[in-house]
Amino acid sequence: MSIDKVLLNRAEGKCELCGSTEELSAYEVEPKNEAIVVCAICLDLIEEPTANPNHWHCLSDSMWSEEPAIQVMAYRLLTKLGSQDQLEMLYLEPEVQQWAEEGLEDPNQEPTRDSNGTILNAGDSVSIIKDLVVKGAGFTAKQGTTVKNIHIANSEAIEGRVNGTRIVLLSKFLKRL
């Protein structure tokens, strides 16, 4: 996609994700159809960022952009890379967060459900329904423990903090609060 002059001026003639000045093009950030400027390397890696995770160290700078479309792309890429530490630092306005999450949804993926069949969403709070031994962490997550601000890992698991440690929990052992 060709770059218009306004977009190129905003980007100061460089990739808005990594800062490269080589082989620039516009990239539409769905579903709002706002464009950002990306280089050929970023463009090749956007759909599958784990193919070269070292390239994305640049996101630690670009995630602080004031442009919502750049924030959305940084959020999506960090999510696909599993960079939880950086995601926890990244603050997005609610409408920007919603936009970012819309682009991550796989229409064929089943929703994550708790033990009662209730659909879980990112940011929900859940309660653990039975004692769970946490392998590798050396503690047991006790029944009744509340896990706030969860992240959806897949259709069967969530990520959250228990006793200050980020762990993955199977949704069949959780109840939404």
Image (cartoon, rainbow, N blue to C red):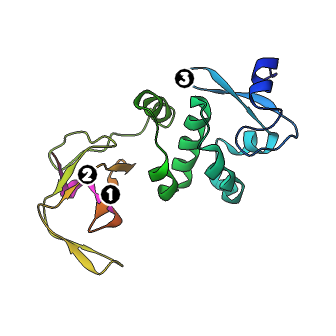
Which amino acid is tagged 2?
A: Lys
Pick the quarter of the image with the C terminus.
top left
| One can see residue 4 in this view | no
Does the magenta-highlighted stretch encompass residue 174?
yes
Q: Residue tagged by mark 1?
A: 160
In-image side of 145 versus 84 (left or right): left
| Numbered circle sitting on residue 31 | 3
Instruction: Give the residue displayed 44% in from the left and 52% down from the top.
Output: 88
Q: Is residue 95 above or below residue 76?
A: above
Q: Position of residue 75 (x, y in %)?
A: 53, 42
Task: Tell me the CA gap for discs 2 and 3.
Answer: 29 Å
**Magenta stretch prevailing secondary structure:** strand
Q: Is residue 126 above or below residue 13?
A: below
Q: Residue tagged by mark 2?
A: 148
Tag nearer the camera, 2 or 3: 2
Q: Position of residue 36 (x, y in %)?
A: 69, 29
Marks 1 and 2 in Cβ contact (< 8 Å): yes
Tell me which segment is drawn in magenta: 168-175
